[in-house]
Image (cartoon, coloured by chain):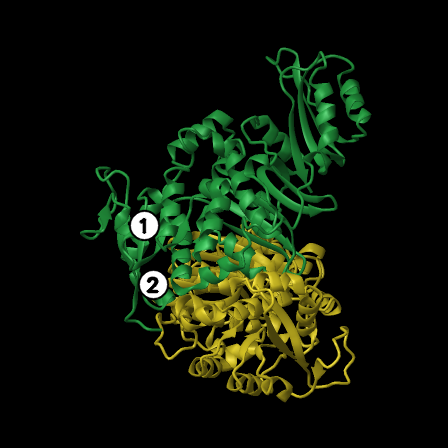
Chain colours: A yellow, B green
């Protein structure tokens, strides 16, 4: 350890995460130096708008709006790219690579969309891209899958990857809040964006799942091709029925090897009460990984937020400064021209049990007809909950059915028939069940 | 990635873990090659007794009883040292380092006892020692603390590090088994040694805690100086009272920064039902880490067993082959001559709540005298459980007390007085409480 040497780093983007990273580098430089074996100096921070008010004071000369201050400075070897969105993030990433910088980023959308281009370019130029912070915030799942569990064939990942959805579900269950009220509360606390669509419709989780599936299974899948359902169609009643049945609803991202290939989807799922995933509350994320040698390993932690994400970014900066990232990146095969090691299953062939809720007119033969439509697809019923019609329900009652094992395809066909039955009132709700 | 190159590795010791490592290297060489970017060939396995029956078939010429086959072979650069105990493991480790080999080991007792000597020697010779498998089996806690969480000041570790104790406690609670019966069942299933003393008296957990405290806090502590209490004095009744109070008993290893320094101990502890640590069952281990940036991160997985441990050893072999271990080892400061970064608190000053159980003669003034002895040390009582004497109890009844916050020192002084009171029948039981 040569304590006299120093490495200069830079940040592009001084939003929430960028500010957290700057704070760790400036206020806790002793800690960074100890782990890196040398001083790590924040040399330059480049932002788009110099006039924006900032909650951090940077040393004189550090802040600018000129990317050239980084690209032209040969002493800066590593850059944390911490702006969101696709452009200009993509163009900036390409410029940074071209000017010889290694990159650390937390921008998951950028990787999910432009990963192949950026990774190919980095490989061509002999540079590295580290992206621990792009999935599951403070949980070091990228390092764990790509390094720590490297002796395993990963067999499955079951993960809670969207903290906003998990926070909303937790609020609904704990306080009996409606979906809309829980969303507003999440926005008020800063857990949800003004437009939370990508969070609650499963897109954000699908982008993260795509990255993990690339890493863990060598799958080559575009995130937008991953079947996904969000929590935005659920009602408080569904959470209550789930509990009555011994489950809790979680937005699960699943990647699992099966006989027909890799099962891959994001869906609200009934998870057994008392199981580790069911007990993940609030804005926490969690990943349950099964490897053929290690068995089940479970990770949980804060999936977003300034300092948890900054923790992951700074760990990546240190790994890059000391040279570990370069080594890891060389063997990563992520978005490489290497062929896929596994094919993704047709979602219609993926099997499982289902929770179904139908709002039906309270009339005879309802259960018989629904059961008939399910039976026609060889779907058998495991249990039924139907309570008496409540006052003010105007003769509409919810009918909840848990099925035995079937396939997604059979379920789609059955639901298609059921949704057109005359006694149906509103859309049916279905969720997967994890036993 | 040069797929034509190859790195030769060796194993010393072909017990349970050694056999698992050999199996992963021989049967899944494609996987190892992909992550290492080159073939990793098992060139030599050295054992003490060639005549012992083995459950694995090695390629011709690989097995021998001659360590020189490794030390004299310059092509072998990394050796997995997988024999247990202190000698000849220590001498062999020194010979391997002297002959230029990097070492990977799962031998926690060796590190806990001879870590300073071995690490100094490795540093002198420019070699590395990787030891992921020495703590918490398949959970990659060493890499997570020393690399992934390197942007944090770790503030606390609360961990279940002994799978045998956790298995015994789980059996007792789930099946109402006595301590002795649960130990026998654990031995039958291979979870406990013929002599499980080190597992159940807290020594094994203390050895692992010492390693984690070195890594996470820069503490310099000998494992045998860590205050520890095992589960061997507990009775089924204690587990039942804990549950009645809303807790589950776990053997917790704790390292926590406080005002007076680093709190460090291993003790059976009442953990709140529903908290992640309380839900860790059977032979699983778990570590709950709090970092000042990342917040709480939780890890669980199998703490022992052939393949989980082999998974950690092979990940270390890959890390060493690609050069990551050498980088990490240089900045590790583990057992280095560097001074301690934190002082260990006097255990007497460590504060907390306590669970107490006294077996007392069913006579007047018992509660008054016990409460008096506690009050004399300023310990106030939070709750009391005393059920009516059962038939056949010969007038002896258990009295269970939960205290408010106090210190270990005050508690020791109070117990010392109480244990000498005339109505006491047998030793008092005390456990810490984690809220």
Label 2 and label 1: CA atoms lie apart by 19 Å
Residue B7 is situated, as x and y percent measured from the top left of the image, at 31, 62
The N terminus of chain B lies in which quarter of the figure? bottom left
Element carrying mark 2: helix
Element carrying mark 1: strand
Q: Residue at x 57, y 57 (%)?
A: A300
Answer whether residue B151 is visible to the viewer in this image: no
Residue A160 is situated, as x and y percent measured from the top left of the image, at 56, 62
Answer whether residue A118 is visible to the viewer in this image: yes
Q: Residues within 10 Å of mark 2 (few under 14, many from 20)?
A: some
Q: Which residue is mark 1?
A: B11
Disc 2: host chain:
B
Q: Residue at x 70, y 72 (%)?
A: A19
Q: Residue at x 35, y 67 (%)?
A: B34
Q: Which residue is mark 2?
A: B31
Foreground residue among B322 and A265? B322
């Amino acid at each position: 350890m040569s304590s006299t040497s120093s490495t200069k780093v830079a940040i592009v983007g001084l939003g929430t995460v960028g500010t957290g990273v700057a704070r760790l580098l400036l206020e806790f430089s002793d800690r960074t130096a100890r782990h890196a074996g040398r001083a790590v100096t924040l040399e330059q921070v480049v932002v788009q708008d110099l006039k924006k008010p900032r909650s951090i004071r940077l040393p004189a000369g550090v802040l600018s709006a000129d990317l050239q201050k980084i690209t032209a400075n040969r002493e800066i070897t590593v850059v944390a790219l911490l702006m969101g969105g696709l452009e200009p993030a993509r163009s900036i990433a390409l410029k940074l690579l071209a000017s010889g910088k290694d990159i650390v980023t937390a921008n998951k959308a950028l990787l999910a969309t432009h990963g192949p281009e950026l990774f190919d370019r980095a490989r061509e130029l002999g540079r590295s891209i580290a992206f621990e912070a792009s999935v599951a915030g403070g949980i070091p799942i990228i390092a764990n899958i790509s390094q720590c569990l490297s002796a395993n064939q990963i067999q499955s990942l079951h993960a809670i990857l969207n903290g906003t959805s998990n926070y909303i579900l937790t609020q609904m269950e704990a306080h009996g809040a409606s979906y809309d009220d829980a969303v507003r509360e999440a926005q008020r606390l800063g857990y949800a964006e003004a437009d939370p669509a990508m969070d609650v419709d499963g897109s954000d989780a699908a982008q993260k799942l795509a990255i993990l599936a690339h890493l863990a299974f060598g799958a080559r899948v575009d995130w937008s091709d991953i079947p996904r359902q969000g929590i935005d169609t659920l009602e408080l009643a569904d959470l209550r029925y789930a509990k009555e049945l011994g489950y809790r609803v979680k937005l699960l991202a699943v990647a699992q090897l099966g006989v027909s290939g890799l099962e891959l989807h994001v869906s609200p799922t009934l998870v057994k009460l008392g199981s580790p995933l069911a007990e993940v509350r609030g804005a926490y994320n969690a990943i349950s990984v099964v490897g053929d040698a290690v068995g089940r390993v479970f990770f949980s932690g804060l999936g977003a937020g300034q300092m948890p994400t900054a923790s992951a970014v700074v760990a990546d900066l240190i790994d890059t400064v000391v040279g570990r990232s370069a080594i890891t990146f060389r063997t990563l095969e992520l978005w490489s021209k290497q062929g896929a090691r596994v094919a993704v299953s047709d979602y219609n062939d993926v099997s499982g049990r289902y929770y179904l809720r139908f709002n039906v007119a309270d009339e005879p033969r309802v259960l018989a007809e629904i059961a008939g439509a399910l039976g026609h697809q060889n779907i058998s019923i495991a249990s039924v909950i139907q309570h008496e019609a409540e006052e003010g329900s105007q003769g509409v009652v919810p009918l909840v059915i848990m099925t035995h094992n079937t396939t997604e395809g059979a379920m789609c066909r059955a639901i298609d028939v059921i949704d057109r039955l005359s006694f149906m009132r509103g859309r049916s709700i279905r969720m997967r069940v994890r036993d």
